[in-house]
Amino acid sequence: QVQLVESGGGKVQSGGSLRLSCEASGDTISNYAMGWFRQVPSGEPREGVAAIDRDGTTKYADSVKGRFTISQDNAKNALYLEMNNLKPEDTAMYYCAADSDTLAVVVGVLIPPGNVPYWGQGTQVTVSA
């Protein structure tokens, strides 16, 4: 099974940018649908932010469309989330996720973590006004 480790979070001012990375091991990400979720506060359901299917099709939540870009590098076995024009409401713990089925259906939706089989440990993004 795949193991996921996120990095790249941090503190930025409103309008700033960050690039999140998710390194996979144990399996290749090309075998999975991949996605980014965020959670505020800890213990609450997670919101699907962006997803990329195995055929490369992407989907974004309306709140991040035009500002965030999801991509993956199969050679590096890594998933990325480029975040531009960040807003204070983007502040959250961001999680990388993998599933054998598409994650596009839960983009823009709040889900219990148990609905997706593979998660990273999360990386905190804090955006100040």
Image: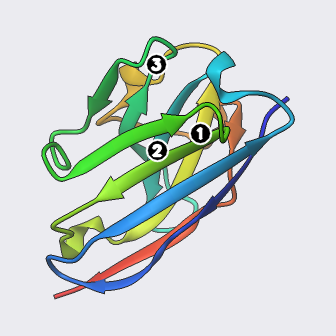
The front one of 9 and 122 is 9
- Distance in Å between CA atoms under marks 3 and 2: 12 Å
Sequence-first disc among 1 and 3: 3
Left/right placement of residue 9 relative to residue 22 reads: left
Sequence-first disc among 1 and 2: 2
- Distance in Å between CA atoms under marks 1 and 3: 12 Å
Left/right placement of residue 93 relative to residue 47 reads: right
Q: Nearer the viewer, mark 1 or mark 3?
A: 3
Residue drawn at the location 85% of the way across and 29% of the way down: 1
Q: Is residue 31 positioned above or below 89 on the image?
A: above
- Asked if the residues shown at circle 1 and circle 2 are in contact, with their CB atoms under 8 angstroms apart, the answer is yes
- Estimate how packed mark 3 is, as few (under 14), some (14 to 19) or many (20 or more) residues with alpha carbons within 10 Å: many
- Asked if the residues shown at circle 1 and circle 3 are in contact, with their CB atoms under 8 angstroms apart, the answer is no
Left/right placement of residue 118 relative to residue 62 reads: right
Left/right placement of residue 107 relative to residue 34 reads: left
Residue drawn at the location 55% of the way across and 40% of the way down: 112
Tell me the tag on residue 53. 3
**Identity of the amino acid at label 3?**
Asp
